Image (spheres, coloured by chain):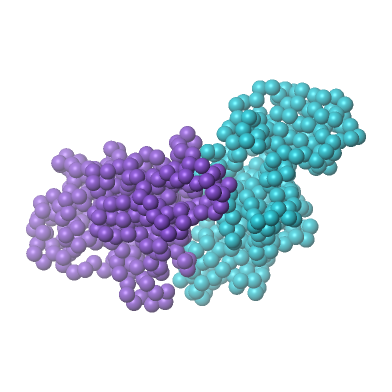
Chain colours: A cyan, B purple
Amino acid sequence: MKLSRQQPLFRETITIQPENQSSPVRWITDWKTPDDLWYRRNHYPYPAPNLDGLQVVGVVQRPLTLSCEEIRSRPAKSVVAVMECAGNRRTLFRPRVYGVPWNEGAISQAEWTGVPLRDLLLEAGICSTAREVVFWGTDGEGEENGPFARSLPLGKSLHPDTLVAYAQNGQLLSPEHGAPLRLIVPGWYAMASVKWLSRIEVITEPFQGYYQKEDYHYYPFPDSDEGKRPVTVLRVNSLIRHPHDFSVLKTGHHRVEGLAWTGKGVIRRVEVSVDRGAHWYSAQLQQRPWHHPYAWVQWSWNWKTLQPGKYEIWSRAVDTAGRMQPLRAKWNRKGYGYNAVGRSRVQVE
Amino acid sequence: MKLSRQQPLFRETITIQPENQSSPVRWITDWKTPDDLWYRRNHYPYPAPNLDGLQVVGVVQRPLTLSCEEIRSRPAKSVVAVMECAGNRRTLFRPRVYGVPWNEGAISQAEWTGVPLRDLLLEAGICSTAREVVFWGTDGEGEENGPFARSLPLGKSLHPDTLVAYAQNGQLLSPEHGAPLRLIVPGWYAMASVKWLSRIEVITEPFQGYYQKEDYHYYPFPDSDEGKRPVTVLRVNSLIRHPHDFSVLKTGHHRVEGLAWTGKGVIRRVEVSVDRGAHWYSAQLQQRPWHHPYAWVQWSWNWKTLQPGKYEIWSRAVDTAGRMQPLRAKWNRKGYGYNAVGRSRVQVE
């Protein structure tokens, strides 16, 4: 069976208020996720359009207020990057954890176009007391823990690929994905890529906002906050798109297909096992990862199975930073960063 | 939180060839499932349109060939009936079973309009040697185990609510749901309601087709066919629509909402427990079930929870035939008829 787009595909509703919808990532063959199939992740109702442009303030020499037109008239940069919610595949943690019950679809990919954040920060002039940069969205203004805001360290803020983006796949951002301006932080989990961006603030102390200090941490223990660590860079990860978990196959040739991605370096290789890890075979990577370091890699492996029975197909990605997917994901109370080996259990008849 | 239709809802792709898509049943507040949100269940690719009308043949005194126009010109009957795939919620069986991995969405509801099958059979004149009636679809012609065909006992065939239907929710059937004609067998699992119906055949021996003799049976053992029993009438069942499994709630008042349905009699009551079955409380039924005996019932129960902690919300339906949902569904190899109590595990903060 080959993946195909003959049948209509849709997003799936995970929660309705606020709107959280997952992408049918398993079925999408397009390299860039079509706009109508992008996952949607919200902490609050959609905000009213921000017509006030973007402020760059805080410990800077020349505070800026820029209209969207001004930002769009500057030298632009485009980056293809995967966007993955930190809670993607939360439902796979054992013991189960509470939170938005994402299966595999809190992930999508686009070409982002915008202005390097670095250009704006350098134009404003960062003072020597600067320590972090805070990004304020307009979602959740006046609500508990709102508005949504996150900070980045100076280094990541000045990385040439960190963008203040206004376009997704060649179209101006939609209201659902942060219009008119959003941050894009390639290689980090998606909570860093603040949508509906209205203000950039350079600060001198670690940011204390709710989504920075409380939420989006790995809490290793069920009943204590000890050992909490912030969620940052994407873990090395992979997904089996075909065959489906618990599907029934005929004996013969099957093309095992999937995606792999990482936030550190690029995917070096993907391995497949059909005997619970006793043997691993190298999958073929369909796109040379170094052309688009932040993008996912499509991989495939041809499986010839002549013996009826029950099999577990596992996929394991390795990145150039030397990171490899574990057999079991590191449990954490809020269910972030699930990255155990991809797994499809099939019955061959 | 109230369920709401402010956000767009979609079907979810379960398999793509053939097309199997589930309905976002949890989120639909309409009493009749809107046509674009109906689940889709196929064994084969969609068949070409059948322009040859309907044959009634076999051991009958006057074989009939009827055009769709002739059928639509006869006295019509409408029935509101739930349609549930026998494999709905297959993913909840433990141990897991292989097959189309339906979660909760292989269920929808419509008002069906057509001609009572009984009228056609009586017009054709059933011979005294008749034992069963076979319904032939046009899907899967020339393919393995095809075309799709199923039989009914004479009694159910002659039931005044068993219809040869041409309309769903007041519109002519769509190609995806069996146009131009399909069978509707209220109160039975959906495999009985043969789509793309082209031929009705009265026979003298039990029908031996694949979907009648092999598939759609409860196989109680993993490795033997002993004790197999055919899938027929809908089991008594319920679903919690809100709150979502593994969601996080605030202390206070919550409206627990859901659906209940059965294939025998009507729903007599629905009970809710928040302490793993130690106490059960009666939910309010929002529609008087006896008006539409084959339709699902919406129910709700107001939960006041002041104590933070982890809770399991269970729902349990009882029908007028005295059947009650079990705590654990009866395991069977193909994963049919899941009907354990509805369950939502929530964390109250």
- Residue B157 in the image, given as x and y percentages of width and height: 18, 57
Q: Residue furthest right?
A: A128
Is residue A211 positioned above or below A243 on the image? above
Residue A86 is at least partly visible in this image: yes
Relative to B53, B301 lies left or right: right
User: What residue do we see at 38% from left, 59% from top?
Assistant: B339
Relative to A153, B50 lies left or right: left
User: What residue do we see at 33% from left, 42% from top?
Assistant: B286
Q: Residue furthest front?
A: B306
- Residue B45 in the image, given as x and y percentages of width and height: 40, 54
Residue B88 is at least partly visible in this image: no
User: What residue do we see at 85% from left, 29% from top?
Assistant: A60
Q: Quadrant of residue A43?
A: top right
* Closer-to-camera residue (B26/B76): B26
Relative to B329, A153 lies left or right: right
Relative to B293, B65 lies left or right: left
* Closer-to-camera residue (B284/B178): B284
Is residue B176 positioned above or below A114 on the image? below
- Residue A125 in the image, given as x and y percentages of width and height: 87, 29
* Closer-to-camera residue (B137/B77): B77
Is residue B120 positioned above or below A116 on the image? below
- Residue B332 in the image, given as x and y percentages of width and height: 39, 68
